[in-house]
Image (tube, rainbow, N blue to C red):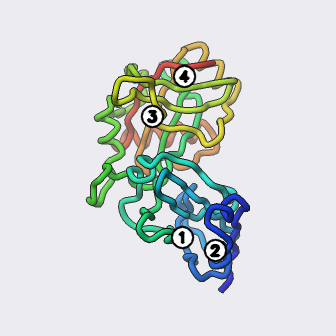
Amino acid sequence: MPRMLDVSDEVRAEIGDEEADRLLAGDNTPGSYDCTSCRTPGDSERERTSTVLFIGDETAVLAFAHATCLPSQVVQVTEDQLRGAVRSIGSDTVDLEPDKVVPEQAVLGVTSGLVLIAGELHPALVVEPTGPIVRPGSTAVGDDFLPLLIEQGFLPVTELSAVPPVLHGWSVLLAMGQLHAVLQPAANGGQPVAWWQAHQPLQVTEGWRAAANKHQQVLVFAAPAGSIGRQPREDLLRAALDKAAAHGRLVGSTLPLAGT
């Protein structure tokens, strides 16, 4: 049965007309899927669905998203991100090259907001993957997202009553008033590398930017998939953070601001 599928010109150019036509005809497309953006169920037979192609150095993964969440697009990622940040179980990917396709990667979602701590507003970023993160090379079922961050120096947050300690060597890159990346130290001691990088620079509010320039640092909180969700208001975001902290599902650090 034909699918209500959107295949952008850039995705078609990457996968070829033959594969794109098979997708549109429903020959190689799952009817139901988990949206790669919001992680809620979708049905390509009943609602507009976008094809999202993640491309690494050697590997390609085609995932699906609600058209209301993401447009059909090509997303360039590093091979380490593609192979390391994968969902531990389940897959809604399409087999483009049988020997090179990995399960659908878990994308890091980043939300900006102002967080009130000890009577003062602080700029914050909340990082939540779209699916479980497994340790690179591991075949075990589970979610290692928080343990991996703790190994990097992030600390468990049980309540948002104080600003987390500064994590030296990491930073948040803000340029031309837009959020570009979260940087971490390079393994060889060279220039910092992107731990997370925006596909396109993200807009932040004037209030967030002013607070970041005032403090010259940004609070970064991280939680496993399904802990925070997409919150439309800062008060709801704060409530979700408090709940995650109370259940032991939140880590955090304060990162210096790079740029303006």
Tag nearer the camera, 1 or 3 = 1
On the image, the x and y values in percent for residue 254 come to 44, 23
Tag nearer the camera, 3 or 2 = 2
Instruction: Give me the C-alpha separation between circle 2 and circle 4.
Output: 41 Å
Residue type, mark 4 in image: His
Other-residue count near label 2 (Cα within 10 Å), few / some / many at <14 / 14–19 / ≥20: many
Q: Would residue 245 appear left or right of 96 to someone viewing this image?
A: left
Residue 221: give its label. 3
On the image, the x and y values in percent for residue 237 come to 55, 40
Residue type, mark 2 in image: Ser
Q: Earlier in the sequence, mark 3 or mark 4?
A: 4
Q: Quarter holding the N terminus?
A: bottom right
Other-residue count near label 1 (Cα within 10 Å), few / some / many at <14 / 14–19 / ≥20: many
Q: Quarter holding the C terminus?
A: top right
Other-residue count near label 4 (Cα within 10 Å), few / some / many at <14 / 14–19 / ≥20: many
Instruction: Give me the C-alpha separation between circle 1 and circle 2.
Output: 8 Å
On the image, the x and y values in percent for residue 145 come to 36, 45
Q: Earlier in the sequence, mark 2 or mark 4?
A: 2
Q: Residue furthest bottom?
A: 1
Q: Nearer the viewer, residue 225 or 48?
A: 48
Residue type, mark 1 in image: Tyr
Q: Earlier in the sequence, mark 3 or mark 2?
A: 2
Q: Earlier in the sequence, mark 4 or mark 1?
A: 1
Q: Secondary structure at mark 1?
A: strand
Q: Residue at x 54, y 22 (%)?
A: 122
Instruction: Give me the C-alpha separation between circle 3 and circle 4.
Output: 12 Å
Other-residue count near label 3 (Cα within 10 Å), few / some / many at <14 / 14–19 / ≥20: many
